[in-house]
Image: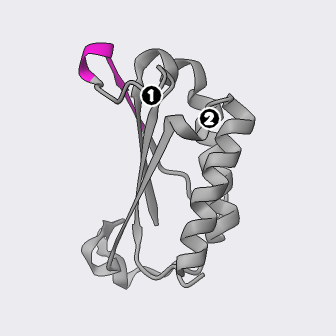
Amino acid sequence: MAQVKIYGNKKTIITFKNEISTAIHGAVMSALAYPPEKKFHRFIELEKSCFIYPSDRTENYIIIEIAMFEGRSIEAKKELIRAIYKNIELSAGILANDIEIALTETPKYNWGIRGKPGDELALNYKVEV
């Protein structure tokens, strides 16, 4: 399971939403071996006055937060981060300097999905990659 939140300036999110979503999901599928149908993205469009960031970033600056079950290898997580940077630059033209990524892992039992604790779910994909 991976829940993705993308924060950014409203204009940037509106302009690149589809490209960013496709880029992130492609990275998740390749690095974490996720099935194509497991896509959970939320975009948070912020007004310019509500999104304060360093002066060395552009208006395309975005923050990507991914919450997921624990169990992935360090290399798989690094591969995910690298693939997100690459895919977003290729599809939306947003440079790595304007992208920040935070991965948060929690035990499956801390999730509630489809009426069950996460550790009681039968998954159609592996978490240990």
Provide the residue span drawn in magenta. Answer: 43-50
Viewer-proximal residue, 107 or 92?
A: 92
**Which quadrant holds residue 54?**
top left
- In the displayed image of the protein, which residue is found farthest to the front? 56
- The vertical placement of 67 against 88, above or below, is below
Q: Secondary structure at mark 2?
A: loop
Magenta span has 51?
no
Viewer-proximal residue, 5 or 121?
A: 5
One can see residue 124 in this view: no
- In the rendered structure, find residue 56 and report the number of the disc placed on it: 1
- In the displayed image of the protein, which residue is found farthest to the right? 90
- The vertical placement of 115 against 12, above or below, is below
One can see residue 27 in this view: yes
Image coordinates of residue 70 in percent, x first then y, are 40, 78
Image coordinates of residue 80 in percent, x first then y, are 60, 62
Instruction: Determine the residue positioned at 41% across, 73% down.
Output: 69
Image coordinates of residue 108 in percent, x first then y, are 34, 78
- In the rendered structure, find residue 95 and report the number of the disc placed on it: 2
Magenta span has 47?
yes
Instruction: Determine the residue positioned at 41% across, 21% down.
Output: 9
Instruction: Determine the residue positioned at 60% across, 36% down.
Output: 20
Image coordinates of residue 104 in percent, x first then y, are 36, 64
Viewer-proximal residue, 48 or 57?
A: 57
Instruction: Determine the residue positioned at 53% across, 78% down.
Output: 74
